[in-house]
Image (cartoon, rainbow, N blue to C red):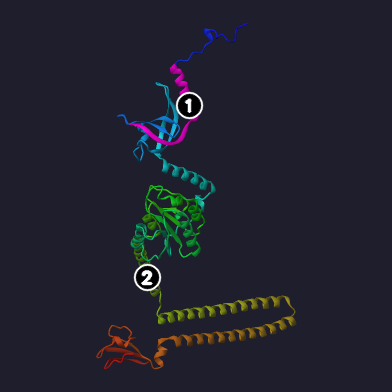
Amino acid sequence: MTDLLSPPPKSDRDVYTVSRLNREAKAILEGGLGLLWLEGEISNLARPASGHMYFSLKDDQAQVRCAFFRGAQRGLGFQPEDGMQVLIRARVSLYEARGEFQLIVDSMEPAGEGALRRKFELLKTQLLQEGLFAPDRKRAVPTLPRRIGIITSPSGAVLHDILTTLARRFPSIPVLVYPVPVQGEGAANKIAAMIALADQRAECDALILARGGGSLEDLWSFNEEVVARAIYQCSIPLVCGVGHETDITIADMAADARAPTPTAAAEMLSPDQRQWMTQFTLRTQRLIRLMQDHLNDSRQGLDWASSRLIHPRDRIRQLRDRLSYLSQKMLYAQRHHLHTRRTKLVSINSRLRRSAPPGRVQALLLNARHLDQRLKGAMHLQLQRRQQMLSALGGRLNALSPLATLDRGYAILTNTAGAIVRDARKIKTGDRLHAKISRGELECVVEDVHEEN
């Protein structure tokens, strides 16, 4: 029986080399922990000529070696120093050559701002999940507000910049300032209360929430949850212009629109009056052009209608000719009808004579004579009526004739060019006129002109 305490045979041993041990330990460390956030104090900071940084990160009970390579230092906004409290993101590793446990740093930031940044990210994630930043709930800002409300500090340069921008772009827009502190203890609650007050009073149809630039700590009032919820509950469209273009706050995400600066917020809510005047001028010119085209079309239509006008004398002549034509046509139709009836009557009489007894024939002949007399009487009466109608139409035509007007004592005056005189203002003393009266014509000389008042 083999002794359990005796070592295994030499051929069954898995003997590690030191490099293999360090290599597998490194793989276990890097694969098991991944990226970590750590906060601590920098000590033993070294900056060799390669540009890398090597230091120890320690707290009050332990420390760990760290390597911060030059390629990962891009975007580092400060100079790390010994004794500085920092927040780093790093992965756990092992330096195989010496078997030293270390951290490979990916990013670094001051610990105070880093804490605020973590708080910012947590609140951002929470409000994003609740839908406070959803695009479909954001209201469109008006292109020409009737009044703009500005929620900012009354003593800062931001208010002056906004008012100057509005006065330059569109000075007729009224402005109402809601004064509020934008930094310090309790500022977030006061900003939220002022947003709610502006919404309750409903004096404006657009709001600007503004503050100048600063550090993350300076802008923290606009990263508070109470401000974000006040913006979300506000029924008036709100534009947030806080800090500089690179500064993004929770208030920017909750607002209906974000402007990179306070001045840009004022530009977003105020149209450029120069563009408006240019559009007004273009529209005025277009309206004038359309009116001119309409007048030209109307003038052409008037000219066309004037070309179709017929002088009353010519119209009377046309009507008289048509009346004569219709009268002749009516007489011809009556004669043709009478001839047809007579022909038919003769045919019937002939048939009667051939087929009927003499007495019946005689009776029919008498009846035929009687009908013939009635027919002649009816035709005569019809002719009289037609002649009376023709006489009446002739009388009406004669009443419309200019000659009938002359018979009533009027005269037609024409100048030497043959044009009819209608306006005394176009006649001068001494002019020669031609007067046509009912019976004869007169040559006249004007001695005096009396114009109508």
Q: Nearer the viewer, mark 2 or mark 1?
A: 1
Residue 283 seen in the figure: yes
Asked which secondary structure carries label 2, the reply is helix
Asked if labels 1 and 2 touch by Cβ distance under 8 angstroms, the answer is no
Q: Which residues are magenta?
A: 18-46
The numbered mark at residue 232 is none
Q: Nearer the viewer, residue 16 or 289?
A: 16
Q: Earlier in the sequence, mark 2 or mark 1?
A: 1
Rendering coords of residue 201 (x, y %): 49, 65
Residue type beneath disc 2 = Leu
Q: Is residue 371 left or right of residue 121?
A: right
Q: Residue furthest top?
A: 1
The structure residue drawn at horizontal position 31% and vertical position 83%, both measured from the top left corner, is: 419
Rendering coords of residue 171 (x, y %): 36, 65
Residue 37 inside the magenta-drawn segment = yes
The residues bearing labels 2 and 1 have C-alpha atoms spaced at a distance of 90 Å
Residue type beneath disc 1 = Leu
Q: Is residue 267 left or right of residue 427?
A: right
Asked which secondary structure carries label 1, the reply is helix
Rendering coords of residue 412 (x, y %): 35, 88
Give the labeled residue for mark 1.
29
Q: Residues within 10 Å of mark 1 (few under 14, many from 20)?
A: some
Give the labeled residue for mark 2.
295
Compared to residue 97, the image places residue 296 above or below, namely below
Q: Nearer the viewer, residue 66 or 375?
A: 66
Q: Residues within 10 Å of mark 2 (few under 14, many from 20)?
A: few
The structure residue drawn at horizontal position 55% and vertical position 84%, both measured from the top left corner, is: 386
